[in-house]
Image: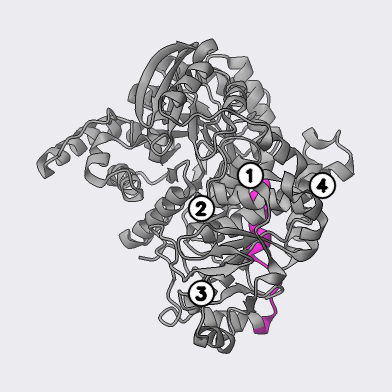
Amino acid sequence: MNYCASPFSYQRRASREVRVGNVGVGGDNPIRVQSMITCDTMDTEASVAQTIELAEAGCEIVRITAPTVKDAANLQHIVRGLRERGCDVPIVADIHFKPEAAMEAAKWVDKVRINPGNYADSKKFKIIEYTDEQYAAELTRIRQRFTPLVDLCKERGIAMRIGTNHGSLSDRIMNRYGDTPLGMVESALEFARIARNLDYHAFIFSMKSSNPKVMIAAYRLLVARLNEEGPDWNYPIHLGVTEAGEGEDARIKSAIGIGSLLTDGIGDTIRVSLTEDSIHEIPVAKALIDSVAAGVSPAISKDAAADTAATTGKTKKNPLSFDPFSYQRRPTDKLQREGVRLGGDELVRVVIRRAQHEKISHKIDRMGDYKPEIIFENARVMEVDSRDDEAIARVNDSTEAQLVTVKDDVDLPLIPAFRLLAAKLQSRHPVLLKDVLNREQILNAGSLILDNKRSADSEIQHPASSIQNQSDFLATLLIASTNIGSLLCDGIGDAILVQGEEAPGQSLRLSYNILQAAGSRIFKTDYVACPSCGRTLFNLQTTTAKIKAATVHLKGVKIAIMGCIVNGPGEMADADFGYVGGAPGKVNLYVGKQAVKFNIPEAEAVDRLKDLIREHGKWVEPSVQPALAEANV
């Protein structure tokens, strides 16, 4: 199955155009940026104000939750208020659980988002073995429930998103396909087939997960399945990492998931989901698009481009070293460098240049978990051009395994360069990943991001030097996360070197945070936190801050913070503990998917979460070391 034109060279996936209000998605349109307001949908004035704020910041499509029929009906007043104020941004109704709310919302909006896992389907974590006849009967029931919405959308000429979430697959899908990318894809295709049978084609797919590996595999599998179905299944794709969280970690995780797919040519519209005010999502999304554009389109000479096409076009000679639909780390022999073991099943190691190491050598003992592990110049790294078959043959002919990387200033996009290296290199040789091969890539992306920041009203009050610094680091962060994170999710990489960031402490922090976000190395507490919306039953930003303050020292513990139950239990599948809004002012606590404490007053919930962690033997008393470490990096 093919999920892209070539994993070794960029070509955007061809899709049909779907109109969302006055905005075209897919086709020849640019990649669109969207977000979601966070206030109560019944608060018309606040909803209008937040939507206008997003639109003025560059958001091209705005989503509003409609959890009940009453909320859905109020979308009429929100849309009218926007149009009266001259704001024509398309409005999307976000629907979960209630087909009746979808039917009401579809009267007023430009697009309806439905989730196949909980639209006319159930999720009670029941174990049911469906016979083929029972399964077919369930599909018939779903068709009956879904058809009226399709007919109304078709009649009004509005769009739909069929948006599967890893955290809310139905019991029916879970029991036939498991909690897998395949289950996510099949869930969406079932609804798409119903729409197509009704001659409705104005829909867009999404496959969202809080785990970048799962998300990447699901989107790739979806596109491959669409390709198999035929050329008229060329529907646009919406990308997003759900429950990404906040701050630097959320931006890294989003770049890994969204950026890697964009570099494969997949994606027509994106949302960066942050547990922050929605306005902060827009510059990150724009910067991510810009950084990917800078990375996939380097200045390559005609001769080099022709050579690359000839070299990478031999798919039989250069098969992929990884399964794009299922994660497995590339097997290698183990090596030792400077007393540190790497390769095989060892941790993915963090490498630093000698010049950078010298700048921080006086405080390494105070850097806690962000210490460098190997100095590049001491690691006997073999640097090759991925297209140089003779050089790679010499490495393969060596009797001992070698640590290999791509040369700097090779005129290839980075991800294809390392994929090509891994395809040609014998698997016994470990690979050192880099974030950039050419500093020019960072500068180009930084310039694009800087232009966007200067044009945003919210940034005008900042000094130009401050904007420049923010833009440079955001470009560094997004490019490093996309390039290194994507390859790690392909299973490629035994050590990493961030060289696009000149500040050594900052580059080391970025290195470790990329490893954590990619699930390659867990060295600190891991958080899954959803963005706010009108369904949220507590203040996610302040609550997340409280939980982090209480638990940030628990290395390796994964905690999910969910504002409501829409995706809560499912997205917490691989979390140790969950903190989920159950009712206004009340919180339910989970161990894995299982709710164990109910209706806890919000004021007591963080302390009760700490007690729950103690009960399960994962609590340790905090020390000052982590805070000091980060402060000194």
Q: Where is residue 581 shown, x and y percent of the image?
A: 46, 19
The residue labelled by disc 1 is: 285
Of residues 398 and 84, the one drawn nearer to the viewer in this rendering: 398
Q: Where is residue 317 shown, x and y percent of the image?
A: 43, 83
The residue labelled by disc 4 is: 469
Q: Nearer the viewer, mark 3 or mark 1?
A: 3
The amino acid marked with disc number 4 is Asn
The amino acid marked with disc number 3 is His
Q: CA distance from mark 4 to mark 2?
A: 29 Å
The amino acid marked with disc number 1 is Ala
Q: Nearer the viewer, mark 2 or mark 1?
A: 2
Please indicate, yes or no, whether residue 165 appears anywhere in the rendered image: no
The numbered mark, 2 or 3, whose residue comes first in the sequence reads 3
The residue labelled by disc 2 is: 520
Q: Which residues are magenta?
A: 286-303
Please state, as top left, top right, bottom left or bottom right, where the N terminus lies in the image.
Answer: bottom left
Q: Where is residue 385 shown, x and y percent of the image?
A: 62, 80
Please indicate, yes or no, whether residue 397 appears anywhere in the rendered image: yes
Q: Residues within 10 Å of mark 3 (few under 14, many from 20)?
A: many
The residue labelled by disc 3 is: 429
